[in-house]
Image: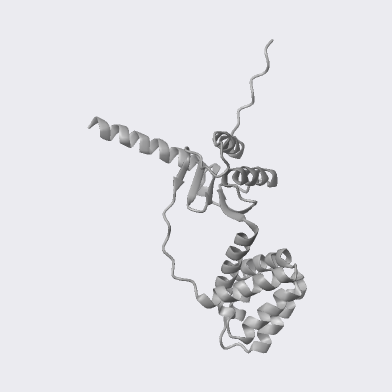
Amino acid sequence: AGPCPPAQTTGPALALASLSLSLQKTHHPTTKPTTQITTTEQHKQAKRNEVSDSYAKALVDLAEEKSQLEAVHADVDAVAGLVRDNAKLRNLLFDPALEAEKKRAVVAKLSREAGFNKYTTNFLNLLIAKGRVSLLDEICEAFEEEYCRLTDTQVATLRSAVRLEQEQQFLIAKKLQELTGSKNIKLKPVIDASLIAGFVVEYGSSQIDLSVRGQVAGVADQLARQLAAQV
């Protein structure tokens, strides 16, 4: 008797296999696959406050000088998430009428509970003292960009219908590392039920769509072109 037929691969596993296959066709690490990648439009955004960039750069420089870049980066990641997801915290810190002393008390409590590095805590207090804490969103964004530049890190958004396992995320990150030639890959998982199954990876100005929704849309486009050609 011959070997048993391979089990049918579905869902995220199938998408991972497709990603692996498309990357195997790429001979140079910086060359992008010719299939299943589309260029996304660059969205026009308001120019970020130059003050935010200068504060972020100052924190990166300090953290690097003190050999605390990774620790401070983890803190900034946490701060960005807390300010984004915790409306009460955001309102307290961003309230222009709230006394600076009370804001510092909030930062002190937050730093203790989260175990922030002392440079992170001092930086947050500096923003309060200078009346710049309302720029925290922009500063965190600018810090992330500078950190990625220094560490050769490619940030990629990973959209999936359901949360992918850590092993699956690791494989995707590894394949993207081969694809982009970047030293590090940072995935930002986002749940998007409209994808049905599979996933979409967005990095830089490129996109790899291995979702069921994307496949359906591709088939629909192909049919539309065939019908138009027949008219």
What is the quadrant of residue 24 in the picture? top right
Quadrant in which residue 61 is drawn: bottom right
x and y percentages locating residue 174 in the rendered image: 65, 44
Quadrant (top left, top right, bottom left, bottom right) of the C terminus: top left
The answer to whether 223 appears left or right of 155 in the picture is left
Q: Position of residue 100 (x, y in %)?
A: 64, 88
Residue 105 vs 156, above or below: the answer is below
> Which is nearer the eye, 50 or 1?
50
156 vs 101: above or below: above
Tell which of 105 and 44 is nearer to you: 44
Residue located 73% across and 66% down the image = 71
Q: Is residue 14 above or below residue 188?
A: above
Residue 128 picture location, percent across and down: 63, 83
Give the residue displayed 62% in from the left and 46% down from the top: 177
Q: Position of residue 37 (x, y in %)?
A: 47, 43
Residue depicted at 44% across the width and 66% down the height: 45
In the picture, which quadrant includes the N terminus? top right
Residue extending furthest toward the left:
231
Residue in the foreground of this view, choosing between 193 and 117: 117
Residue displayed at 71% across by 66% down: 69
